[in-house]
Image (tube, rainbow, N blue to C red):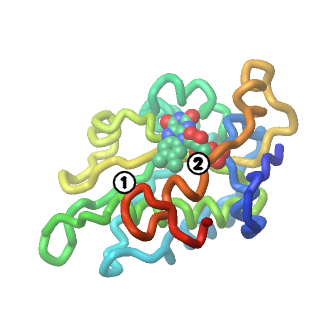
Amino acid sequence: MEKPAPADHPIQDLLARRWSPRSFADEAVPGKILLSLFEAARWAPSSFNEQPWFFLIAVKEDREAFERMLSCLVPGNQAWAKGAPVLMLTAARLAFERDAKPNRHAFHDVGLAAMSLVIEATARGLFAHQMAGIEAEKIRASYGLPDDVDPATAIALGYPADAIPEDMTERELAPRSRKALEDFIFTEGWGKPASLLR
Ligand SMILES: Cc1cc2nc3c(=O)[nH]c(=O)nc-3n(C[C@H](O)[C@H](O)[C@H](O)COP(=O)(O)O)c2cc1C
């Protein structure tokens, strides 16, 4: 299903087409395509080119790996994400490799890599749904994350569903909404919309 953003100003088609569905087609994503998605993530910018991102992936064909990853999501997310053909977890290394000092921008940079992956996916007819609802400590223990690496999000990925399951119709068809530009673009001070917007 397509659900383009009703943008107030023109934006690139890829950005408008991206959205976060909860229903996916029962169709595997070829490994070659998954490699391109990770390659897109790899070329994301990062503070000091630290590349603090990590991805764990499980595809549905590998039942055991898929169930293990699915069990690391909160129940509300498991309920729909089990229908996706691909699950991923993202994680951030919170300390710089070279001097172990805190990297204040680690999660920011994981987000950039994730968005690159998501946009590459959109260009290839795929859709992704990112999730904060994960069991961080379970992920840490289950996959043996080092102490300076923190779980960040999960991502469900797949081709769009031909039909939306009845129990999901309301959420899947709900209109997409955003704050107005005036609410978050300032010049003179906090809460004062930039003159560009007047
Ligand atoms: C970091 C992050 C965490 C999110 N966590 C969840 C989640 O746990 N469960 C869920 O159903 N959606 C989750 N979402 C999806 C958002 O609700 C969704 O992106 C937002 O409502 C905007 O909708 P759109 O992506 O379709 O434009 C998350 C998105 C992001 C980027």
The numbered dot on residue 179 is 2
Decide: is 165 above or below 157. Answer: above
Q: Amino acid at mark 2?
A: Lys
42 sits left or right of 35 in the view: left
- Residue, disc 1: 91
Q: Please tell me which residue is depicted at 69% across the width and 62% down the height of the picture.
A: 15
Q: Residue furthest bottom?
A: 48
Residue placed furthest toward the top: 167
Q: Residue 166 appears at what percent x and percent y?
A: 80, 20
User: Is tag 2's residue or tag 1's residue first in the polypeptide sequence?
Assistant: 1
In depth, the one of 177 and 192 nearer the eye is 192
Q: In the image, is 162 to the left or to the right of 20?
A: right
Residue at image x 17%, y 64%?
102
Looking at the image, residue 22 sits to the left or right of residue 51; the answer is: right
- Judged from the image, the quadrant occupied by ligand 1 is top right
In what element is the residue under mark 1? strand
The residue lying toward the viewer, choosing from 52 and 66, is 52
Quarter-wise, where is residue 121 in the image?
bottom right
Secondary-structure class at tag 2 = loop
Per the model, the C-alpha gap separating discs 2 and 1 is 28 Å
Nearer to the camera, 140 or 30: 140
How far across and down, in percent of the image, does residue 115 sit?
55, 61
Q: Position of residue 169 (x, y in %)?
A: 78, 25
* Quarter of the rendering occupied by the C terminus: bottom right
Which residue corresponds to the image point at 17% horizontal and 77% vertical from the top-left? Answer: 98
